[in-house]
Image (cartoon, rainbow, N blue to C red):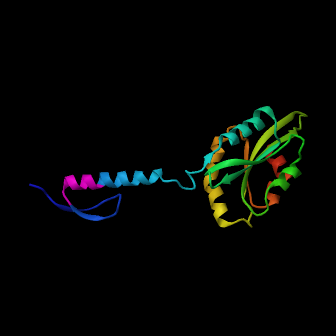
């Protein structure tokens, strides 16, 4: 003899007249359907990191080949790629001038400084550049992809979120580094 009851499925929020077996089946199907959506690409999980991007960052970090690297999201390839690199002779002003005024970017800057003990040090800054004049779609895309990209850059000391040049001024870097 089967006992029927009204149940509310916790996964799909449907009220059903069920017995024990059909309630179990509904729950199993709802869980399977929810996992199916995890495989769909979206802004947070779909942006990969190009091998060239990681290799360029490692060259900046270990070999000191670059002063800075600017990254952009290539929406066609659905990955973060290198847009521009700066030679070790370039200054912070060259780096700041390389960031677009109306579009978002990720950047890594190798900041060299001298401590109060007269020791030469270097700190790597990750900068999420999102100017207020950029498109809302670009802001959303860059903000949702930032954490995954940032995790792939092992060795970054400080992170700065900047919406205008004053938030990433050279003085801000000096204060954070000391």
Residue 87 falls left or right of residue 35: right
Work out which residue is located at the far front of the displayed protein and give it: 76
Residue 154 in magenta stretch: no
The structure residue drawn at horizontal position 63% and vertical position 58%, both measured from the top left corner, is 141
The structure residue drawn at horizontal position 72% and vertical position 65%, both measured from the top left corner, is 134
Work out which residue is located at the far left of the displayed protein and give it: 1
* 123 to 33, vertically: above or below: above
Residue 148 in percent (x, y) is at 61, 47
Residue 150 in percent (x, y) is at 66, 46
Residue 131 falls left or right of residue 37: right
Residue 23 in magenta stretch: yes
Residue 67 falls left or right of residue 2: right
Q: Which of 89/10 is in front?
A: 89
Main structural element of the magenta stretch: helix, strand or loop?
Answer: helix
**Region of the chain picked out in magenta, as a range:** 18-26
Q: Quadrant of residue 151?
A: top right
Q: Quadrant of residue 130?
A: bottom right
Residue 93 in percent (x, y) is at 88, 52
Residue 19 falls left or right of residue 34: left
Q: Which of 161/80 is in front?
A: 80
User: Taking the image as drawn, is residue 12 in sight?
Assistant: yes
Q: Which of 44/3 is in front?
A: 44
Q: Quadrant of the C terminus?
A: top right
Residue 175 in percent (x, y) is at 82, 48
The structure residue drawn at horizontal position 72% and vertical position 58%, both measured from the top left corner, is 104
The structure residue drawn at horizontal position 87% and vertical position 34%, both measured from the top left corner, is 120
């Amino acid at each position: 003899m089967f006992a029927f009851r009204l149940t509310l499925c916790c996964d799909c929020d449907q009220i059903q007249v069920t017995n024990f077996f059909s309630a179990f089946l509904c729950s199993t199907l709802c869980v399977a359907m929810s996992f199916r959506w995890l495989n769909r690409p979206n802004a947070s999980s779909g942006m990969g990191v190009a091998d060239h991007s990681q290799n360029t960052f490692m060259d900046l970090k270990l070999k000191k080949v670059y002063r800075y690297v600017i990254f952009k999201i290539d929406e066609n390839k659905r990955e973060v790629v290198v847009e521009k690199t700066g030679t070790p002779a370039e200054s912070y002003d060259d780096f700041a001038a390389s960031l677009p005024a109306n579009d978002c970017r990720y950047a890594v800057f190798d900041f060299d400084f001298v401590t109060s003990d007269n020791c030469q040090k270097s700190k790597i800054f990750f900068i999420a550049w999102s100017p207020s004049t950029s498109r809302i779609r670009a802001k959303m895309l860059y903000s949702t992809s930032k954490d995954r990209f940032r995790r792939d850059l092992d060795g970054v000391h400080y992170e700065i979120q900047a919406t205008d040049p004053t938030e990433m001024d050279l003085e801000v870097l000096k204060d954070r580094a000391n």
